[in-house]
Amino acid sequence: MQTTVNVSGMTCGHCVMSVTEELTGLEGVESVDVDLVAGGVSPVVVTSTRELSEDEIEKAVEEAGYSVA
Amino acid sequence: MQTTVNVSGMTCGHCVMSVTEELTGLEGVESVDVDLVAGGVSPVVVTSTRELSEDEIEKAVEEAGYSVA
């Protein structure tokens, strides 16, 4: 299943890597696809084997140092 | 001794870390101080025990994925 969140504050490939790493660490996450809009709001598609809660996604994004828009 | 170079293309703390790591890897480098101007030209002060050539600094910056302005 796929969940899309909008993440703000990412500016470069390193930021994308940080967010991807955190989200990939969630149980059941198979892949993370970030469409970087540098300095803006970037859609992030998370593919997982189970339903993810808004809350756990938001926590992971914040753990990486960014926020859900 | 201190050498200052202007580095362009850095946008976030991760970029600063990459450049700092590469420059710190040069022989004789004691510290690297980056004054990040996100998306602009950032002055980078390299403190070292020997004279550094423009060439080796530029190579290290490019190795990190950025360029000397």
Image (cartoon, coloured by chain):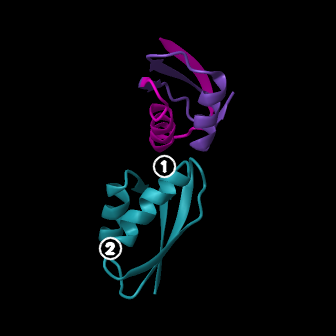
Chain colours: A purple, B cyan
The dot on residue B26 is 2
The residue shown at (69%, 27%) is A69
Q: Position of residue B29 (x, y in %)?
A: 39, 79
Judge whether residue B7 is colored magenta.
Answer: no
Q: Is residue A33 above or below residue A64?
A: above
Q: Secondary structure at mark 1?
A: loop
Q: Position of residue A44 (x, y in %)?
A: 53, 24
Amino acid at pointer 2: Leu
Mark 1 or 2: the one toward you: 2
The residue shown at (48%, 37%) is A16
Q: Is residue A28 above or below residue A60?
A: above
Subunit under mark 1 = B
Amino acid at pointer 1: Gly
Q: Position of residue B68 (x, y in %)?
A: 42, 59
The furthest residue to the top:
A1
Write the start and end of the magenta stretch as one range.
Answer: A1-29
Left of B40 or right of it: where is B24? Answer: left
Q: Position of residue A60 (x, y in %)?
A: 58, 36
Q: CA distance from mark 1 to mark 2?
A: 21 Å
Whether callout 1 and callout 2 share a subunit is answered yes
Judge whether residue A18 is colored magenta.
Answer: yes
The dot on residue B9 is 1
The residue shown at (57%, 38%) is A10
Residue A40 visible to the viewer: no
